[in-house]
Image (spheres, rainbow, N blue to C red):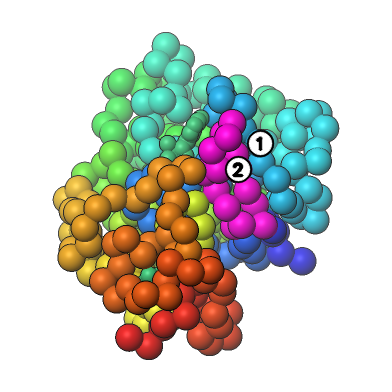
Amino acid sequence: MPLLEVRNLRIDFGPRRAVDEVSLSIDPGQTYCLVGESGCGKSITALSIARLLPTPPAAHPSGEILLEGRDVLRMAPRELQQIRGRTVGYVFQEPGAALNPVMRIGAQIRESLALHRPGSDSDAEAVRLLKMVGIPDPETRLKAYPHQLSGGMQQRVVIALGLAPQPRLLVADEPTTALDVTVQAQIIELLRDLQRHLGMAILLITHNLGLVGEIADRVGVMYAGQLVEEGPAIEVLRQPRHPYTRALLRSVPELGHPARRLVGLPGNVPGPGDWPQGCRFAPRCPVVRPTCSGPSPGWSSVAAGHQVRCPFTEG
Ligand SMILES: Nc1ncnc2c1ncn2[C@@H]1O[C@H](COP(=O)(O)OP(=O)(O)O)[C@@H](O)[C@H]1O
Ligand code: SF4
Ligand SMILES: [Mg+2]
């Protein structure tokens, strides 16, 4: 059974649809990368897994989000409380936002352990967690306040906090974007090692396709609230079939440099509810055809487990 199976997820903010018909599945221990420009719906898709969608406006998700077979969208508040942290842990982009500035690192980790793993030896476990995420001299660091650590060390602490409850799925949303080049590579390597040792699944969100090849088993490419290509990472990276994926790959930012404008692509991602008729990518597509503004393209299968929302996949 997959660890996570999202079926036909739609998310509406008031009258505006922000995520549309997203389906994806992650097996235990697998790494799934969700990529796409800013504003495509990656973060809210990820947040919906533990029903953490930002409000207001009221967010209305529909479809199914099966976590170990149980539908998160139909869980009672008590059940949701139990899966947060323990089944699904989150690591966000800005370590500053995830850490309490007036609490020592050790106290923050022990607090999470007391909540999620009562009865564990929290002092020893806090040291072990900091060691695991590659923080030197953990006993001393546990007494530090967040501002006494570098950005890279803070992000390691945030990952340690995410790991403390021993989640089956770690959702990492742009976990390296705020960090410099060398540290980005280190954090990705750390995630990869942790995943190997702990057998944890990872949903990694990034706009940096350069990182994806390092870690992903599968890749999903999002555009304007939809998945437009999905498949094994090696195939999607080596033989991208959707014109949008190809444009993204041509624009891979060099490590450490902010994402450039997409090479050869005019315009921007349309916002929720402003999607054009037919293929949503048509206004920017370099190989658009007259029929593309007709009925919305459904999935075309290009290989086993590799599909694309465009009927013209050879061009
Ligand atoms: N609370 C909210 N209310 C209304 N719109 C939102 C809210 N949160 C996100 N959105 C919109 O949903 C779209 C997708 O957002 P997001 O998932 O953050 O994109 P990504 O992570 O791919 O950059 C964006 O256009 C954003 O403006
Ligand atoms: S359906 Fe048409 S507009 Fe959309 S990606 Fe394919 S070729 Fe481009
Ligand atoms: Mg985001």
The residue positioned 52% from the left and 19% from the top of the image is 107
- Callout 2 crowding tier (Cα within 10 Å): few <14, some 14–19, many ≥20: many
Please say if the residues under marks 1 and 2 sit with CB atoms less than 8 Å apart.
yes
Q: Nearer the viewer, residue 103 or 55?
A: 55
Image spot of residue 149 (x, y percent): 30, 28
Q: Nearer the viewer, residue 206 or 215?
A: 206
Image spot of residue 72 (x, y percent): 75, 43
Highlighted range, magenta: 8-22
Q: Secondary structure at mark 2?
A: strand
Of pointers 1 and 2, the one earlier in the residue sequence? 2
- Residue 137 vs 100, above or below: the answer is below
The residue positioned 29% from the left and 62% from the top of the image is 284
Side (left or right) of 282 relative to 181: right
Q: Is residue 10 magenta?
A: yes
Q: Nearer the viewer, residue 244 or 76?
A: 244
Image spot of residue 214 (x, y percent): 37, 67
Q: Is residue 47 magenta?
A: no
